[in-house]
Amino acid sequence: MYDLAYVRPGGLAEATALLEADENATALAGGQTLLPVLRARLASPSRLVDVARLAELKGMALDGDRVVIGAAETHAAVSQSPVVAGAIPALGRLAGGIGDPQVRNRGTLGGAIANNDPAACYPSAALALDAVIRTTRREIAAADFFTDLFSTALEPGELVTAVMFPRCAQAAYVKFPNPASRFALIGVFAARTAAGMRIAVTGAGAGVFRWREAELRIDAGGGVADLDDLALPEDAFTSDLHGSADYRMHLARVMTGRAIAAVDA
Amino acid sequence: MGRNFGRPVRRLEDGRFIQGNGRFVDDVILPRQTYAAFVRSPYAHARITGLDAAPALQMPGVVRVMTAADLAGAPDMPCGWMIHSRDGAEMKVGSRPLLASDTVRYVGEPVAVVVAESRDQARDAAEAVAVDYDELPVVVDCGDAMAPGMPQLHPAISDNLAYDWELGDEAAVDAALAVAAHRVELTLRNNRLIPNAMEPRACNADWDAQDEKLTVWMTHQNPFGMRTLYSAYYGLAAEHSLRIVSPDVGGGFGAKAPNYPEEVVVAFAAKLVRRPVKWTADRTEAFLTDAHGRDHLTTATLGLDAEGRFLALKVDTIANMGGYLSTTGSLIPTYMYGTMLSGQYVIPAIHCRTRAVYTNTCPVDAYRGAGRPEAAYVVERIVNVAARAIGVDQAEIRRRNFIRDFPYQTPVLFEYDSGDYEGSLNQALALSDYAGFPARKAEAAARGKLRGIGVAAYVEACGIGPSAILAKLGGGAGMWDSAEVRVNPVGTVEVLSGAHSHGQGHATTLAQLVADRFGVPIESIRIVQGDTDRIQAGTGTYGSRASVGMSATFNACEKIIAKGRRICAHLLQVPEDSVRFADGVFASAATNKTIPFGEMAAAAHAANAFPTREIEPGLVESSFFDPPNFTYPSGVYVAEVEIDPLTGVTEVAAFSAADDFGIIANPMIVEGQIHGGLTQGIGQALWEECRYDPDTAQLITASYLDYGMPRADGLPEFRLAFGCAPSPSNPLGMKGCGEAGAIGSPPAVINAICDALAIDHLDMPARPEKVWRLLHPKAAG
Ligand SMILES: Cc1cc2nc3c(=O)[nH]c(=O)nc-3n(C[C@H](O)[C@H](O)[C@H](O)COP(=O)(O)OP(=O)(O)OC[C@H]3O[C@@H](n4cnc5c(N)ncnc54)[C@H](O)[C@@H]3O)c2cc1C
């Protein structure tokens, strides 16, 4: 790790001010992504602004038809929350399947969303459920938030404060774990929402996306078997050591089938 | 079985470890400590055209930068095992300086070292050392290394060929194969593995100029070997002024047995800067530079008669050595491999040819099993291919060919000491409910899953080793082990052992042995290992050789008891030959008086009740044990897998292991060793694979994001059973158990997968996509 400064601000305003004052400062939440990067000397921020304990980024509560989860809530907290379990049971299970207990006890929703790893789990839920990301400056629809690999609509100095997930009892996340990292080689979040069936795929390689053709076919009364011949967006899939684009595409189909089956189970 | 020996005594060292009171090299911080960071080659093959350390020297806290020029007098890294090619020529050793001077041959090869006041300062400065490279083309795959037109790694070594070795009678094998009723052939790879000990390599060297004494703390499996090398070979200090300390060692698996350049460079640096210098590898350095394991490409042919009896086995292997020959790299694919190709079977003729080649990869050396897993994999795979070809059940073909009479001289040098192979097979078939498999397969099929069962039988050579035999095979050093047993005046006991635990629990098992021999509480015994100032000589631990050190300990205890009997004869005033020792008490039929062990110890030191001209005072005895032969543990494993045809994912549904380790000191520790070994072997079969980019020879699997380690949630409950055919090669009848699990399990798992898929072979690891493609050959891509 390169030499750097560490600050733990007392409140969100102070955190924002610190980040806005120094373009080389970086927010630190659970550190489960950032610390390995720093340790490998792949980044050299001037200072870390620790947002993990900010009261403004905490809390999990129902707000009308939405569950509002603070950005600094850990995966463990989300997975154990009765509020989340009552409103969107699939989301709690997704959080409980991230990494291992150590990762879940530290890693946060805000960090996961802001990092937008193409193999991360949360982005698929946010996209499928039409979540809204609340930041220190505005509210952003999930569809507009995840822009590209490891990049989001966040501007420099802007922090995620909470994510608002519409309630959804009929949803399921099915992950095919990468045998090495246990991130998603393919993960599919399927949800029956007021707007119809939603299917979001993560792990394909080029970032999380919705498989709209499949959503339409299911909404039109099709079953899982009707997805076999359906096209997937080819440019969304890339090849690496762990699986070719073709194999990932195949897995996306199989996991979609399993997710839908789980939704309807 | 005694009060302790043979029982599942809880590990005495664990309390310390789980409370964070272990002492590892990185815990050692010396006064005036400095820290080293290595400048490593980012290229796999390049000429160094310039090196400028000046910018680094300007950085804060920098004490010294060392390059090859500062080590001009130091000899190249040695390869410790001479192998001769079939034409009689000595193996060709590519020169490997401590720090690369003109050419680098794998990514991560050390080029320079920075010594600074702190670890971070050393690393910052290491990045500032400017090295100019001219990149050269690379070769990664051992199958390509000898091809015409490939990049040549070492001057004057043509075709990248270190040696072309053979063992066995090729003409006899060819003749037998020519007339065999059945012949099967198989080409397979044994995938390259990265060892991944929990504790990375580390050292801390301290030069005492006043005493001209060098102390090196080093996480290592064989501190004594390092003392010899550092003194006699590198001349860092005289042997009696060189202390190597290997304190608690957090796993080795073979990768902490070689001599590495970094530790030697740090020792030279400590002398140069006259301050202690410490280096602790980070995980990336461990991936890049800890000696890797396996990496063979093999073609094998097995001939059988009409009844399915083996007639001859011919094996042709290309072994990847990496960029240089590591300390025992040359030994692994030859005498640790070709010698094991008889497996558990009567095979009248065997021939093995091994060509060892250089590639632009990390050097390869011993890794859990070291040659023996590669041999077992070849034998146990081709036996199943044969069984399938001639339509005989995989258990039955083994039964038909087992060796039954011991000792058994194989056609490949080794003489097996003892065994009951059919007994282990029967145990394994019972444990796994082999007979019930068809029903389980049908049940799985009903759930849409493909279930398969795989049998594998292994034998290995442990307890290395008989020094005279090893010398004939090219070894240089004696392979005995030592123990000094010191009984203190009030009866506590210290055992100075030349073996060295790196997780195996010697502090417990040696204490169990001594406690029972002396009839004293186990708490009164302390086992001392790993410090060459305390232990005069030893050979360390690898290759499941603790039985050697254990036997030395046993023999030293016998000497103590013999002396105790002589002392007690005087105390009891009875003839010496009437004195018996049992359950911690000396007694004689000639008197009612008895003397407990502790009282004898006190008397030995009081020295006033026996003639000290006949019997010296004190109670210290030592023993060096050189075994007459290796020991030959064996076992039969049965793996059962279930494959999801939609995804290609293989799940190990059940695993049964029936092993024969001879006499067992502590069944709990042995079970732990088996669990660990099976886990590593299943890891090799399903997930682990070291991959280099074929075009650049960059390590692709350089972190746990990409290197698939086995984890508990991917493993079944292991079913274990033990047979016992004691080894005649040591006084305790022990055989060794450290590597067995990693040897027998890869073929068992792959045999099960091939059974499920009804195919002859697939290479490890059985990645989901690979399996899926076999099931869906017409799929795109
Ligand atoms: C071993 C391991 C296994 C894992 N497995 C999985 C898995 O299976 N699935 C999965 O989805 N993830 C997995 N992860 C990643 C994990 O979920 C991380 O917790 C997550 O990606 C980052 O969250 P964090 O709180 O640790 O963020 P940090 O590492 O602290 O920060 C990550 C990035 O987000 C930024 N950031 C943090 N908080 C905010 C905020 N409130 N607003 C704006 N920017 C912010 C930081 O500046 C940084 O750039 C794994 C990680 C590890 C180490």
Image (cartoon, coloured by chain):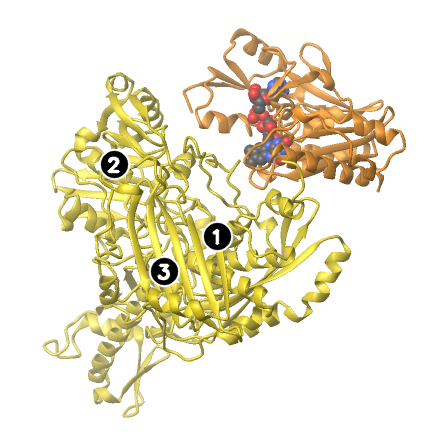
- Foreground pick, B471 / B613: B471
Residue B364, percent from left and from top = 36, 46
Does residue B701 appear to the left or right of B776 in the view shown? left
- The residue lying furthest to the left in this view is B613
A70 over A104 or under it: above or below:
above
Q: In the rendered image, which quarter is residue B404 located in? A: bottom left
Res B372 seen here: yes
Q: In the rendered image, which quarter is residue B5 located in? A: bottom left
Q: Secondary structure at mark 2?
A: helix
Lower sequence index among marks 3 and 1: 1
In the picture of the structure, the residue carrying the numbered disc 3 is: B352
Disc 3 crowd rating (10 Å Cα; few below 14, some 14-19, many 20+) is many
Which of the chains bears the disc numbered 2?
B
Amino acid on which the number 3 mark rests in the picture: Cys
- Foreground pick, B411 / B643: B411
Image quarter in which the N terminus of chain B is found: bottom left
Spatial CA distance of label 2 from label 3 is 40 Å
Spatial CA distance of label 3 from label 1 is 15 Å
Which numbered circle lies on residue B188? 1
Do residues under tags 2 and 1 come within 8 Å of each other at their CB atoms?
no
Which numbered circle lies on residue B266? 2
Mark 2 or 1, which is nearer the eye? Answer: 1
Which of the chains bears the disc numbered 3?
B
B458 over B565 or under it: above or below:
above
Amino acid on which the number 2 mark rests in the picture: Val
Are discs 3 and 1 located on one and the same chain? yes
Ligand 1, by image quadrant, is top right
Lower sequence index among marks 2 and 3: 2
Lower sequence index among marks 2 and 1: 1
Q: Residue at x 74, y 28 (%)?
A: A200
